[in-house]
Structures are given as C-alpha cells and as structure tokens.
Amino acid sequence: MAVFQPSPKDFPELKNDTFLRAARGEELEHIPVWCMRQAGRYLPEFRESRAGKDFFETCRSPEACCELTLQVSTPLRRFSFDAAIIFSDILVVPQAMGMEVQMSPGKGPTFPEPLKEPEDLQRLKTKVDVWSELDYVFKAITLTRHRIEGKVPLIGFTGAPWTLMSYMIEGGGSTTHSKAKRWLYRYPEASHKLLSQLTDVIVEYLLGQVQAGAQALQVFESHTGCLGPVEFKEFSLPYLRDIARRVKDQIKESGLDNVPMIVFAKDGHYGLEDLSESGYEVVGLDWTIDPRSARIRTGGKVSLQGNMDPCALYATKERISEIVKRMLEGFGTKGYIANLGHGLYPDMDPENVGAFVEAVHTHSRQLINR
Ligand code: CP3
C-alpha cells in the first residue's frame, strides 16, 4: 500500500482567503474570525483525543497535531472559523535549546531546572539545529496543509524572545515575573545575550514553518504586561522588530511568497504606536484597548486583530451578539480580523464560541453591505 508522505508541494488550492485579505487591508464580503486557543480543553472531542497522553508527546506527533487542528478549525466539523492555527506550544523552542519542560496537569508548564544565574546560559546549546530539533512541527504543518484541503489558511506561531526568556527563568507561570525581571535589571548584558540567542532560533523556526506550508505567522509576546515602557523598548521591541525583518528578508531570499505576520503583545497598550511600526502587517490587541482609539493610535499603518474579552463568552448568545456588533463598529470593516483578546478558557461553552463566530459573520455582512 502506498504510504502518504506529505511534501510541502502541491497543496490544495485555498478556497477561503478572507483572513489573508484582511491581513493585507483589502476589501471583503465578511470579516474573518478565529480564536486564540481555539483547539483546547473547552471542546469534548479535544479532551477525548488528549486523554491520558502527555502534552509534549502530543506536540511531537504530527498526526495528533493535525487531527487536533482539524477538529476545531475545519468548517463544518465544528465552527466556521476563517483560519486554523497549528496545534503546538510556544515552549517547544526552549526544549529545542536543551531545556527540559513538562506540562503538569492543573499546574501548567514547568521547567525542573530553570535558569537561575547567567552561568546557567552555558547549559543551553550553542548551536541549535532547528531543522532537526523542530522537524515534528514542520511535518505537522505540511500534513495539516494537505488535510485541511484549502478550506482555510493555516497559521504558524512562536513565542517572542522576552516571553520565552521569562518562562526559562521563572520555571513556569508567574504573576510578578520577578525572577525574570531581576535579570533585566541586574544582568542586562546576559539578558540581551539570551534574547539574541532566542531570536536566532525563532527566525529559523518561523522560516521553517513557512517552508513547511504556514500561510501566516503569529508571534506571541504574552508577557508584555509585566514590563514598563522603558524595559519594553529595550528588551522586547528590538527583538520583535528583528524577527519580522529577518523572517521577511529570508522568505524573499528563499524565493517563497511573503506571508502576513501578526504581533500579539498582550497588555502592551503603552507600546501600540511602536508595534504598528515594527514590521508586522497585523497587530493583535487584548481587550483592554478601545477599538476606536487603537485605530487612531495605529494610524491606518496596520491591520488590527482582536479583541473581545474572552469572559464575554460567559454571557448569553444575545448579549454576545450585541458585544460583537459594538466591537465591529469600533474597528470598522477594513483591515480587521475578529478574535478574542486572549485565549479561550477550558470552562467555556462551545455553543457560545459558535455564537461569537456567527455574530462576526452576520454583523459584518450587514455593515459591509450598508
Ligand atoms: O489553538 C491554539 O491557539 C493553538 C495552540 C496553542 C497552544 N498553546 C496549545 C495549548 C498555542 C498558540 C499556544 C501558545 C502558548 N502556550 C502561549 C501563548 C499564548 C498565550 O496564552 O498567551 C503560552 C503562554 C503557552 C504556554 C502554555 N501552554 C500555558 C500557559 C498552558 C496552559 C496550562 C494550563 O494547564 O492551563 C499551555 C498548555 C496548552 N497549550 C494547552 C493547549 C491546548 C492546554 C493543555 C492541554 O491540552 O493539556
């Protein structure tokens, strides 16, 4: 029997390109929508597929990642999302650099041996072979691009350097991020060294994802909120800029088509103007930013993505519809991708996620045809 060997060639033709067109600021018939953490524990079929399996083992199985991605993102199988995001995790990058990371149920990601002092940087691999270390992600992307049959585009992603650095030093989730921030104030040089090392790996990782078939890329700077504007400008923004510039240059050099890049700096409202000039086509927003003021502050330079409070999904379907309508009126219909302001939580009702998606499609069609 012939074995299906997915190759990053001859992908099925894309049928719904609203997400890509919105990222480029083009006119559309409806506003595209997807959700961060759309493949997650709020779905019974996700819990069933993941049951009893180690989280990172699942991440290392291209077949499992493909199935988890398709479960939720293939229109008709669950919701009419306009984009899929590959099932994986941001912490595969520290693993590729030589760090151990476990996912403890109920506790979240844990590093048994986090970085404590600058000498610990010696524990990281000096040269990371991204192509072989992370080839399971590339294989998952290629397989998913084939099996999604062009129904919607596939988004690849990475954590940004500061967010990954903070995990590597904190050893897990944290409310203060004080161990990682201690490095910024006490060891700025070692901090820059680590951030540069991470940036080099991330650039190759994103390029590999595009070569494997990713049609857009999102960079998650989830821990922007614990930085102030000065630290953001020194320890986050330059690396975010560097990633966009180098990925775009290398895509061009490799003869690949440009893909839109999204930067999501959660709680980084103070940096919105800078983010809109950082080389990304799309800026993702959390729910603390007012849509109209985000438009003014970004001056039409970028498309915007976001930003309904995920907790609004606890409301009734009628209320969700009203909240969505107000959000769309605030952002306007051009250069806009609807999303939540952060990921879905495990106790959310899948029906209300469906109501969110339908409300975006229905209200946006009405607004566009007005
Ligand atoms: O649907 C999607 O969005 C794609 C998959 C995706 C996951 N993680 C799967 C996942 C994406 C894009 C991520 C990114 C990620 N991972 C981020 C950045 C986004 C953000 O939330 O700010 C961060 C900070 C992580 C690290 C991480 N991984 C955390 C904090 C957790 C939650 C731990 C917990 O117990 O609540 C994870 C685990 C994780 N990653 C889950 C999923 C679906 C849930 C655990 C499981 O499936 O067993």
Image: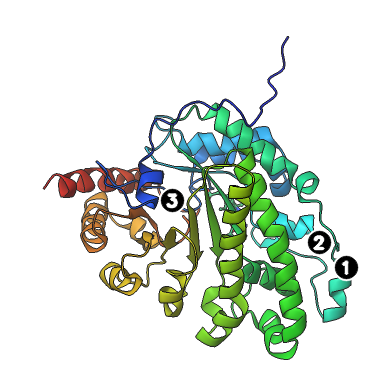
Count of marks placed on residues:
3
- Alpha carbon distance from label 1 to label 2: 8 Å
Residue projecting furthest to the top: 1
Residue projecting furthest to the left: 370
Residue at which label 2 appears: 99
Q: Can residue 171 be seen in this view?
A: no
- Alpha carbon distance from label 2 to label 3: 29 Å
- Image height of 152 relative to 118, above or below: above
Of the residues under marks 1 and 2, which one precedes in the sequence?
2
Residue at which label 3 appears: 35
Q: Does the CB distance between marks 1 and 2 fall below 8 Å?
A: yes
Quarter of the rendered image showing ligand 1: bottom right
Side of 133 where 34 appears, left or right: left
- Type of residue at label 3? Cys
Residue at which label 1 appears: 123
- Type of residue at label 1? Arg
Q: Is mark 3 within 8 Å of ligand 1?
A: yes
Q: Position of residue 345 (x, y in %)?
A: 48, 56
The residue that appears at 68% across and 84% down in the rendered structure is: 184
